[in-house]
Image (cartoon, helix red, strand yellow):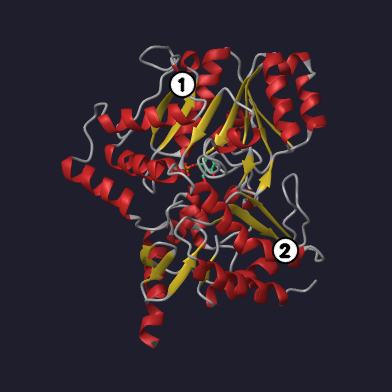
Amino acid sequence: MESSIALNRDIFTRALHVLPGGVSSPIRSWKELPLSPFVPARGKGAQLVDIEGKIYIDYCMSFGALILGHAHPKPSLAAAGALMRGSTYGLTTATEVQLAEFIVKHTFCEQVRFVSSGTEALSTIIRIARGVTKRPLVVKFEGNYHGHIDALLLEAGSYASELTATPSAGITRSSVCDTIALPYNDEEAACRVFSSPELASRIALVLIEPVAGNMGVVPAKLSFLEYLRKQTRTIGALLCFDEVISGFRVHPQGASGLYGVIPDLVAYGKIVGGGFPAACVGGSKTIMEELAPLGEVFQAGTLSGNPVALAAGAATLQEIFQPGTYEKLEAKTAFLLDPIERILQDTPHSLVRVGSMFSLFFYEKYPRKKPAFLPKSRTAFAQFFQELLQEGIYFSPALTESQFVSMAHTEQDLLKTRDVLIEALSRLDV
Ligand code: PLP
């Protein structure tokens, strides 16, 4: 046991020598926590096993990518089959057409363009919006994260909000001078911008996470989304929902289905790639055909629409669109969280959930904009996270990140988690 305990640490120590911060993406460093990350060896269903053999029930689920859980046979076999036929061709494949048809059938999109990451999807969306409207400005919201694009890191959520050099060292003022960041869910602040003729006539795009998942889970108010929909039409700007997390998660039609508000453009990621690097941009035919080769908005990618990734994505979507899946996911999440919500009612803490995504806020009650994340919230989270980890429950390792219930979580997993959560919460100061 003693020697195995060194293993996670050994690997991560080696990682620190050859990977900046030991990671390929900063949130994985557990920087807010007084311990270093474990090293996963494999996953199956809701379980993640580290290289020392310790088993965790996983609620990070690769930050929401794995709605079916780890190594689900359907996407795994689909990806393996695609891989054995060839990993990439540089040509449109039948799988690509099949997945695009599926998305078009089930969402408001008439066409999609596949890319390899959410970041790429959002950078394409800015360009489409500017190309279509011939205007420069992008309006975004504080605490929303849209990938690591220069222009969108202004007041961004997720790990970007931890930096002191905001929006990030290496970003020039000119890269963000056409971005306006407004408080989330704040109609008055948005109204000040939309009612300024000089600003309104220069806005190309209003971009929002309709269910924010990178400042904990903070859902937009329906009235706020409706307001943005109306105002963007009035001023001639495009509205985009960043559904990289919420797409195919909070509702079969994502947040636009949940709220009944239809944007002009959408970004899907995570679930759409079934655990592989894939994402897409979607919208009406008229807007999407502005993209090259039909239009003048250039966008390209060697591995875009990768057949292995899209085979996994297609298999995942087919599986979650089986009748009753979203109802089951909802029931699992309610089973886990309803008692916790009741317990937290009379405390300074809160739990927010939308469908199967949720987060706990320490010393914050149901935030409607970017939470303060006070030092005492951070201390409480660190204590809570470690207690959970000790009991074999793995939560996303930062206050800004969401937690995800997958189809693979069993009643036993959820019961155990519930007990551990209740115990850990009872030890917090109130
Ligand atoms: N948009 C949202 C809402 C996200 O949560 C993320 C990543 O977490 C992105 C965009 C960027 O996606 P990717 O990490 O695939 O580049």
Whether ligand 1 has any atom under 8 Å from the Cβ at mark 1 is answered as: no
Whether the residues at callouts 1 and 2 have beta carbons within 8 Å, the answer is no
Q: Amino acid at mark 1?
A: Glu
| In this rendering, the label closer to the viewer, 1 or 2 | 1
Residue that badge 1 annotates: 110
Going 46% across and 44% down the picture, which residue do you hit?
323
Residue 379's tag is: none
Work out whether residue 121 can be spotted.
yes
Q: CA distance from mark 1 to mark 2?
A: 43 Å
Residue that badge 2 annotates: 377
Q: Quadrant of residue 265?
A: top right
As drawn, is 260 to the left or to the right of 390? right
Q: Quadrant of residue 321?
A: top left
Q: Amino acid at mark 2?
A: Ser
Q: Residue 28 in the image: x percent, y percent? A: 49, 58
Going 39% across and 80% down the picture, which residue do you hit?
6
Name the quadrant of the N terminus.
bottom left
Q: Secondary structure at mark 1?
A: loop
